[in-house]
Amino acid sequence: MKADQHPLTRLGRPRHNRWMRHPGVRTGGRLTLGERAADRTRLVMGSWPFVLTFLALLVVWIIGNGRHGFDPYPYILLNLVLSCLAGLQASVLLIAARRSDQVASELATHDYQTDQGTAMAIAALRADVADLSVQLARVEALVKTRHPTP
Protein backbone atom coordinates (compact mmCIF):
# COMPACT_ATOMS: atom_id res chain seq x y z
CA MET A 1 0.00 0.00 0.00
CA LYS A 2 1.31 3.44 -0.90
CA ALA A 3 2.04 5.81 1.95
CA ASP A 4 -0.54 8.38 0.83
CA GLN A 5 -3.26 5.83 0.04
CA HIS A 6 -6.14 5.42 2.45
CA PRO A 7 -7.07 1.78 3.23
CA LEU A 8 -10.68 2.20 2.06
CA THR A 9 -9.42 3.19 -1.39
CA ARG A 10 -7.98 -0.31 -1.81
CA LEU A 11 -11.53 -1.67 -1.68
CA GLY A 12 -12.37 0.25 -4.82
CA ARG A 13 -14.20 3.04 -3.04
CA PRO A 14 -13.32 6.59 -4.04
CA ARG A 15 -11.92 9.03 -1.52
CA HIS A 16 -14.79 11.37 -0.65
CA ASN A 17 -13.14 13.05 2.30
CA ARG A 18 -10.31 15.24 1.13
CA TRP A 19 -9.82 16.41 4.73
CA MET A 20 -8.03 13.11 5.36
CA ARG A 21 -5.02 14.57 3.50
CA HIS A 22 -5.35 18.05 5.04
CA PRO A 23 -2.29 19.06 7.09
CA GLY A 24 -4.46 20.49 9.86
CA VAL A 25 -6.32 17.24 10.59
CA ARG A 26 -4.83 14.39 12.57
CA THR A 27 -4.92 11.09 10.66
CA GLY A 28 -3.43 7.62 10.73
CA GLY A 29 -1.38 6.73 13.79
CA ARG A 30 -2.16 10.01 15.54
CA LEU A 31 -5.82 8.99 15.95
CA THR A 32 -7.19 6.86 18.74
CA LEU A 33 -8.82 3.53 17.95
CA GLY A 34 -12.27 5.07 18.56
CA GLU A 35 -11.59 7.96 16.18
CA ARG A 36 -10.46 5.59 13.43
CA ALA A 37 -13.55 3.43 14.00
CA ALA A 38 -15.80 6.52 13.82
CA ASP A 39 -14.19 7.58 10.54
CA ARG A 40 -14.65 4.14 9.00
CA THR A 41 -18.20 3.86 10.29
CA ARG A 42 -19.13 7.22 8.80
CA LEU A 43 -17.59 6.23 5.46
CA VAL A 44 -19.36 2.87 5.35
CA MET A 45 -22.77 3.58 6.94
CA GLY A 46 -23.20 6.84 5.09
CA SER A 47 -22.88 5.26 1.65
CA TRP A 48 -25.24 3.97 -1.00
CA PRO A 49 -23.63 0.50 -1.09
CA PHE A 50 -24.50 0.09 2.61
CA VAL A 51 -28.11 1.19 2.07
CA LEU A 52 -28.57 -1.03 -0.98
CA THR A 53 -26.97 -4.04 0.75
CA PHE A 54 -29.21 -3.52 3.77
CA LEU A 55 -32.30 -3.33 1.55
CA ALA A 56 -31.21 -6.48 -0.31
CA LEU A 57 -30.83 -8.34 3.01
CA LEU A 58 -34.34 -7.24 4.02
CA VAL A 59 -35.75 -8.51 0.72
CA VAL A 60 -33.94 -11.85 1.15
CA TRP A 61 -35.29 -12.11 4.71
CA ILE A 62 -38.85 -11.37 3.57
CA ILE A 63 -38.68 -13.83 0.66
CA GLY A 64 -36.97 -16.51 2.77
CA ASN A 65 -39.49 -16.15 5.55
CA GLY A 66 -42.53 -16.75 3.33
CA ARG A 67 -45.40 -18.86 4.59
CA HIS A 68 -43.23 -21.60 6.05
CA GLY A 69 -40.12 -19.65 6.94
CA PHE A 70 -37.73 -19.89 9.85
CA ASP A 71 -39.61 -17.30 11.93
CA PRO A 72 -42.76 -18.99 13.33
CA TYR A 73 -44.45 -15.64 14.01
CA PRO A 74 -44.23 -13.53 10.88
CA TYR A 75 -41.44 -10.98 11.18
CA ILE A 76 -41.25 -10.86 14.97
CA LEU A 77 -37.57 -11.76 14.84
CA LEU A 78 -37.01 -9.25 12.03
CA ASN A 79 -38.69 -6.57 14.13
CA LEU A 80 -36.41 -7.39 17.06
CA VAL A 81 -33.30 -7.28 14.87
CA LEU A 82 -34.30 -3.97 13.28
CA SER A 83 -35.10 -2.42 16.67
CA CYS A 84 -31.73 -3.45 18.07
CA LEU A 85 -30.00 -2.20 14.94
CA ALA A 86 -31.77 1.16 15.17
CA GLY A 87 -30.70 1.63 18.79
CA LEU A 88 -27.12 0.68 18.06
CA GLN A 89 -26.96 2.68 14.85
CA ALA A 90 -28.14 5.85 16.60
CA SER A 91 -25.27 5.60 19.08
CA VAL A 92 -22.72 4.86 16.36
CA LEU A 93 -23.94 7.77 14.24
CA LEU A 94 -23.69 10.13 17.22
CA ILE A 95 -20.10 9.01 17.76
CA ALA A 96 -19.37 9.56 14.06
CA ALA A 97 -21.01 13.00 14.20
CA ARG A 98 -18.87 13.95 17.19
CA ARG A 99 -15.78 12.89 15.24
CA SER A 100 -16.99 14.96 12.29
CA ASP A 101 -17.31 17.98 14.59
CA GLN A 102 -13.78 17.35 15.85
CA VAL A 103 -12.46 17.28 12.27
CA ALA A 104 -14.29 20.54 11.49
CA SER A 105 -12.78 22.10 14.62
CA GLU A 106 -9.27 20.98 13.62
CA LEU A 107 -9.79 22.38 10.12
CA ALA A 108 -11.04 25.70 11.52
CA THR A 109 -8.07 25.93 13.90
CA HIS A 110 -5.64 25.23 11.07
CA ASP A 111 -7.36 27.82 8.85
CA TYR A 112 -7.21 30.40 11.66
CA GLN A 113 -3.52 29.76 12.25
CA THR A 114 -2.85 29.99 8.51
CA ASP A 115 -4.81 33.25 8.35
CA GLN A 116 -2.84 34.67 11.28
CA GLY A 117 0.46 33.77 9.60
CA THR A 118 -0.72 35.29 6.34
CA ALA A 119 -1.82 38.46 8.11
CA MET A 120 1.63 38.83 9.69
CA ALA A 121 3.31 38.23 6.32
CA ILE A 122 1.08 40.84 4.67
CA ALA A 123 1.85 43.34 7.45
CA ALA A 124 5.59 42.73 6.94
CA LEU A 125 5.20 43.19 3.19
CA ARG A 126 3.29 46.44 3.71
CA ALA A 127 6.06 47.71 5.96
CA ASP A 128 8.65 46.74 3.34
CA VAL A 129 6.67 48.48 0.59
CA ALA A 130 6.37 51.60 2.78
CA ASP A 131 10.16 51.54 3.37
CA LEU A 132 10.77 51.08 -0.35
CA SER A 133 8.43 54.00 -1.11
CA VAL A 134 10.38 56.24 1.28
CA GLN A 135 13.69 55.11 -0.26
CA LEU A 136 12.31 55.68 -3.78
CA ALA A 137 11.20 59.20 -2.82
CA ARG A 138 14.72 59.90 -1.51
CA VAL A 139 16.30 58.57 -4.69
CA GLU A 140 13.92 60.66 -6.82
CA ALA A 141 14.75 63.78 -4.78
CA LEU A 142 18.46 63.05 -5.12
CA VAL A 143 18.15 62.56 -8.87
CA LYS A 144 16.20 65.83 -9.20
CA THR A 145 18.85 67.75 -7.24
CA ARG A 146 21.72 66.34 -9.31
CA HIS A 147 19.97 66.44 -12.66
CA PRO A 148 17.48 69.30 -12.69
CA THR A 149 14.99 69.17 -15.56
CA PRO A 150 15.01 72.27 -17.80
Image (cartoon, helix red, strand yellow):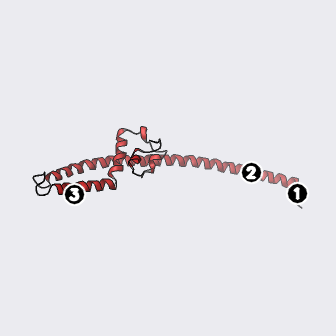
C-alpha distance separating marks 1 and 3: 95 Å
Q: Alpha-carbon distance for marks 3 and 2?
A: 80 Å
In the rendered structure, which amino acid carries the disc numbered 2? Val
Name the mark nearer the viewer: 1 or 3. 3
Residue tagged 2: 134
Please indicate whether residue 49 sits to the left or right of residue 74 in the image: right
Q: Position of residue 55 (x, y in %)?
A: 26, 56
The answer to whether 96 appears left or right of 70 in the picture is right
Q: Secondary structure at mark 3?
A: helix
In the image shown, does 49 or 124 lie closer to the viewer? Answer: 49
> Which amino acid type corresponds to the residue marked 3 in the rendered image?
Val
Q: Are marks 1 and 3 in contact (CB under 8 Å)?
A: no
Circle 1 residues within 10 Å: few <14, some 14–19, many ≥20: few
Label 1: which residue?
148
Rendering coords of residue 21 (x, y %)? 47, 46
On residue 85, the disc is none
Indicate which disc, 1 or 2, sits on the residue closer to the N terminus: 2
Residue 42: x percent and y percent?
A: 35, 49
Residue marked by disc 3: 59
Residue, x 34% and y 43% (percent of image)?
A: 37
Considering the image in quadrants, where does the C terminus appear?
bottom right
Which type of secondary structure does the marked residue at label 1 adopt?
A: loop
